Amino acid sequence: MRKNPEHFVWLAAFWIAVYLLLTALPLFLLLFSPAPSPRGFWRDFSAALGFAGLAMMMLQFALTARLQTVKAPFGSDLVYHFHRQISQVAFGLILAHPLILFVTTPSTVSLLKFWNAPWRARFAVAALAILIVQVGSSIWRRQLRLDYDRWRFWHGVLASATVVLGLLHMMKVGHFVNLPWKRSLWLSYGALWVGLLAYVRLLKPWLALRQPYEVVAVNAERGQAWSLTLRAKGHHGLRFNPGQFAWLTLWHSPFLAKDHPFSFSASAERPELLRFTIKELGDFTATIKQAVPGQLAWLDGPHGAFSVDRYPHAPGYVFIAGGIGITPMMSMLHTLADRRDPRPLLLLYANRDLDSITFREEIEQLTPRLNLRVAHVLDRPPENWTGESGFINDAVLQRQLPEEFTDLDYFICGPPPMMNAVEQLLLRRGIPFGQIHTERFNLV
Ligand SMILES: Cc1cc2nc3c(=O)[nH]c(=O)nc-3n(C[C@H](O)[C@H](O)[C@H](O)COP(=O)(O)OP(=O)(O)OC[C@H]3O[C@@H](n4cnc5c(N)ncnc54)[C@H](O)[C@@H]3O)c2cc1C
């Protein structure tokens, strides 16, 4: 289960090379002999941008299909971040394709008259219109108050429509895909898309249904959170690295794709009982307290690279958590305790007040089993509080970090403003970027 850190470096290099190859390959192959007759620099250049944009679009699904081997070296945070950024690059390239034509050949503007235009242009206009809606609704999802589940469903539908229409446009124009093998190349990208869709929407839910879990207990925790304990039903369950997460389906069939990501909050050394600790924040998380023992649940996981097991040679670890961001840290602390790990550990844990500290008592019980120092940071401390108060800032770090702090590995999870601020502060203190690890609960 625990892999050498070098293994992930090589795997990352491999997947980056595969991605670059798959993005650029169609472009180069299309120019191979017999090369199509040139139509002028700007026209061919704009087509090249369109091809590159479409190839990137078609690879998007490979990024978000939760393929563990693809995500393992990077972590989900980074892959989703890349997905968001590269989508915008692809969108820019696809948008530049007609804009260049309109500027360099003004007569092509008439192709925008949808009902009078030839099919090749209609496909292009429809693809671009859908893409604009898709990109806009993703960037401004929260501002537009779009329900997450509905948005996720339509995001997939719109992306598939864009890809199909883009391919139809390309085939109808036909200039660079004038030979059967060139057309087959693009169709194989389409087949990859369909294959991944079938894997994510059909095969994975089917596999999940065959490996159910049952709810063993639902316990109230401080800070409006609930711990949900699950046990594998009729199979061996899953093994995970401490700090990883899984997608949880409760109440619905896995085929409905209404799963939510949650970090494991108990020891990875005791995988027979899996625990998730979930804060009531919205529609789904508010239903956890209604779960009853014996009820079925399904998991897709483990996922994520936020784990001490990825950095086994560190001389010690610093965990910096805010609110419910404590869950992956609890999994790591419990696991290190079960392994009797002697290395020095520091937990900096920010909360609103003393009563809202999730796992306050559990952390107290864990401390004697570890070489652990805990510093609570309270926004609203009680009277006579002698600990840290306010937010985790440079002064708090100055007081709390041990002397040899630049050698340690840092794990940060909490509200985004806290994570951004702490990451910057650590970088400014000279901690190498590669020793700062983050898990963002606002992945999407
Ligand atoms: C890697 C990871 C680990 C997490 N671990 C924990 C944990 O241990 N404990 C905990 O309490 N929370 C955790 N979360 C956050 C948790 O997944 C969201 O709070 C929860 O999905 C919100 O669902 P909701 O319907 O209650 O909220 P809503 O009010 O419907 O949504 C609030 C926001 O949560 C996000 N969200 C909603 N549904 C989903 C979904 N199906 N998939 C992904 N994001 C969604 C969206 O950004 C949405 O805008 C984790 C998130 C991630 C990404």
Image: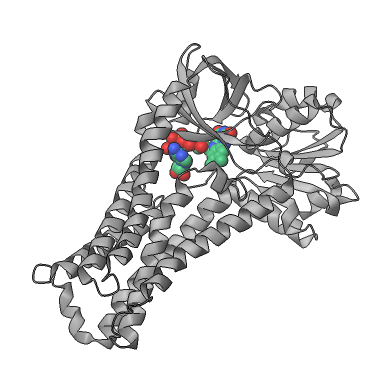
Q: Residue furthest left?
A: 116
> With respect to residue 171, does 395 lie above or below?
above
Residue sitting at 75 percent across and 47 percent down?
410
Instruction: Name the side, left or right, on which 337 lies relative to 356.
Output: right
Instruction: Name the side, left or right, on which 251 lies relative to 163.
Output: right
Residue 105 in the image, given as x and y percentages of width and height = 24, 86
Residue 293 in the image, given as x and y percentages of width and height = 51, 11
Instruction: Name the side, left or right, on which 279 lies relative to 201.
Output: right
Residue 39 in the image, given as x and y percentages of width and height = 28, 86
> With respect to residue 298, does 151 lie above or below?
below
Which quarter of the picture shows residue 340? top right
Q: How many marks?
A: 0
Residue sitting at 33 percent across and 42 percent down?
153
> With respect to residue 290, does 173 lie above or below?
below
Which quarter of the picture shows residue 268? top right
In-front residue for pair 43/381: 43
Which quarter of the picture shows residue 148? top left
User: Colour scheme of this structure image?
Assistant: one colour
Residue sitting at 71 percent across and 43 percent down?
310
Residue 139 in the image, given as x and y percentages of width and height = 41, 57
